[in-house]
Amino acid sequence: MSTVVLLSTRRLPPTYFDQVREDLGDQNITIDVVGWVAPSAWVADKVNSFTLIGPGRMPAEPVEVVEDAAAEAAATPAAPAEEKAEEAQAPAAPAAAKPAPAAAPKPRPTGAKRVVKAVEWRARRAKKVAGRVVPKAIKTSAPVKFLRGQRASNDLGKTYWERVLSRRDVLTTIDRADVVVALDAGAIWAGWNLGQRKASTPVVLGLPAARREFDQLKLAASAEGSGR
């Protein structure tokens, strides 16, 4: 049975691992995941292992709830007759109180106070404008967003790789893999370093490249079997 290790810095849904098996062409493949964030739901029935190396915690196993209306009705005690009688004799609710009159508007400052308020307002406005060094149109432009995204991915990638190196259990899981797959930009740096450390294990980016590696492994195993 082949084993694949998925490196991911994104939140993955449980259904994603069904897609992985379909894309790799093997429903019996063993999947181990090294994730920076926890999956969106419980995945223990979808993967062999999911090692969380980032912040947060793994989702709890869902609890199956069996609904039984008859059992619930039997377990709920009926209200005593005395309580029902008290409820029937309970006095009606008092009429709603009249709303309080609206407060008088606060008088506007005059004289020196008005001058002080005006100076304070202009100071706050000047401070606010001074903070806008870059116009909003530039801040929200596509090139700036791209550069910020690249920087964030680079920072996350380095942190993710450092965490992988610090976890002996993660390195042991990776050593058992037939193919290691970096699924996103945040995991590329870790994949590249793993490829340099262990050239005997294919480390690829994305599932299509992983499919080619598994196909080659199957061909090699088939050729070896026929040679015997």
Image (cartoon, helix red, strand yellow):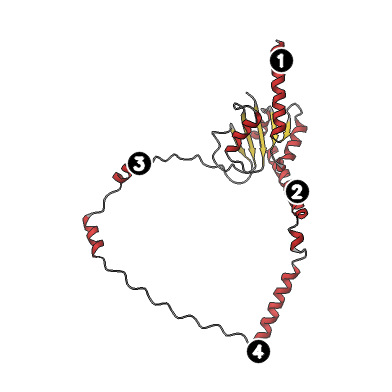
Pointer 1: residues within 10 angstroms few (<14), some, or many (20+)? Answer: few
Q: Is residue 6 above or below residue 217?
A: below
Three-letter residue code for mark 3: Asp
Q: Which residue is mark 3?
A: 68
Residue name at image x 75 percent, y 61 percent? 137
Q: Amino acid at mark 4?
A: Gly
| Amino acid type, label 1 | Glu
Q: Residue furthest top?
A: 228
Callout 2 secondary element: helix
Q: Quadrant of residue 131?
A: bottom right
The CA distance from mark 2 to mark 4 is 55 Å
Q: Looking at the image, which residue is at 63% across and 35% down?
A: 33
Marks 1 and 4 sit apart, C-alpha to C-alpha, by: 98 Å
Q: Which mark is residue 111?
A: 4
Mark 3 Cα-neighbour bin, 10 Å: few <14, some 14–19, many ≥20: few
Front disc: 1 or 4: 1
Q: Which residue is mark 2?
A: 150
Q: Earlier in the sequence, mark 3 or mark 1?
A: 3
- Would you say the residues marked 3 and 2 are in contact, meaning their CB atoms lie under 8 Å apart? no
